[in-house]
Amino acid sequence: MIEPSFEFVFPAIRGIQADSEYYVSMCPLKLLPRIFRFDEDDLSPELRAQRTLNTARVPTIANYILKYRDSYVFSAITASVDGDVRFEPMGNNGESSRIGALRIGLDAQFVINDGQHRRAAIEAALKEDPSLAEESISVVFFLDRGLSRSQQMFKDLNQNQVKASKSLAIAYDQRDKSAAVARAVAAKSKAFKGIVDLEQNKLGKRSRKLFTLSAIHQATQELFADWEQLDSHKAIRDACRFWNEVDLLIPEWKLVRGSKLTAGEVREDFVHSHAVALHALGHVGKALLEQGSDLKQTLAGLATLDWSRQNGEQWEGRALIGGRIHKTTNTMLLTANFIKLHLGLPLTESEQHAENLFRKGKA
């Protein structure tokens, strides 16, 4: 807020970190572009207190605000203030001494230590939806103690950030339809129930889980083409039906569920329990569901497929590269090709092209 005394006035709460005062306030979104400027693009890194703005990220964040206008959420922006700063508490004792007005001179300089992309995205979103102007975002103000301190703050604020694993993001995503279907398939299908890790992207040798939720999500997502028009309940039924039929033909999955084999042993010895094979099976399943094939009859050939990782002649260059599991778009496609050919299914034009290149390379 701006008062006639030519200063910004923010309602604030005063706190202490590392023996220094800092202040937490709320800033109307319409003021963000005016107060927090980003004009350091031309400075070399040693003269800046933050990374350069990645303009490619800004539209993505802005679209997130606009798409989820009624449910978007942002964490606080952190900024350093260089200028005349005064805190006027409501009282002198107890809680009243920590709540008050933060007065900052109009000529003060603000440096964003964390949140410059959020600021830029909010500015872009305001142009599309002016009604955002009166909404607010929390801001943490620190008193500026020079460039060196600001650079150290940027490093400290960012060094310990850990991005949520893809599996955990899928487990918590309440908006994405494919995430909801994947969670339901992991929980309800006989094939995966009890053997899916909902947090990790990679499983350790001692993990008791056979699959990650991210692998289930990617494989199940592959089953269907038009997710926007897809009925979630039907997708869950079709996906469970497909994976349960596959499960009947891969006995090791059942042995893990029954604690007759460890998940680590199965992952060590077989290709079928890795994301590349699961994704490939989803790719095959998509063709079968689209064609309305009899799943039990068409998939029956999986029972005679040698999934052993020791079968390098069969899997090398497909699911294996140099004897190690390797997942890329190409290895998934080549693995799916092998499964389709084993089942006597025709390849599409693009699949046949990839197969021709593969065989040419092995010749």
Image (spheres, rainbow, N blue to C red):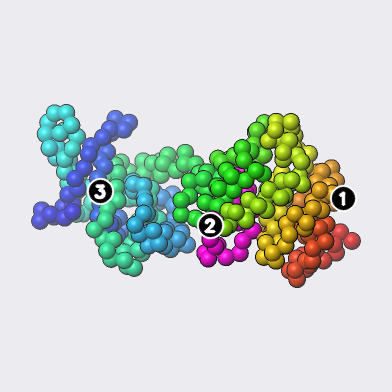
Viewed as shown, does residue 308 lie left or right of 138?
right
Q: CA distance from mark 1 to mark 2?
A: 40 Å
- The label shown at residue 232 is 2
Asked which quadrant contains residue 106, the reply is bottom left
Nearer-N-terminus badge (1/2):
2
Q: Amino acid at mark 2?
A: Ser
Specify the segment rendered in magenta: 212-233
On screen, residue 310 above or below 228? above
Say which residue appears at 85% left-offset and 64% top-offset. 360
Front residue (pair 67, 322):
67
Residue under numbered circle 1: 313
Q: Amino acid at mark 1?
A: Glu
Say which residue appears at 34% left-offset and 48% top-offset. 77
Viewed as shown, does residue 281 lie left or right of 9?
right
Nearer-N-terminus badge (2/3):
3
Q: CA distance from mark 2 to mark 3?
A: 39 Å
Q: Could you tell me residue 262's position as x and y percent?
A: 71, 32
Single out the mark in the foreground, 3 or 1: 1
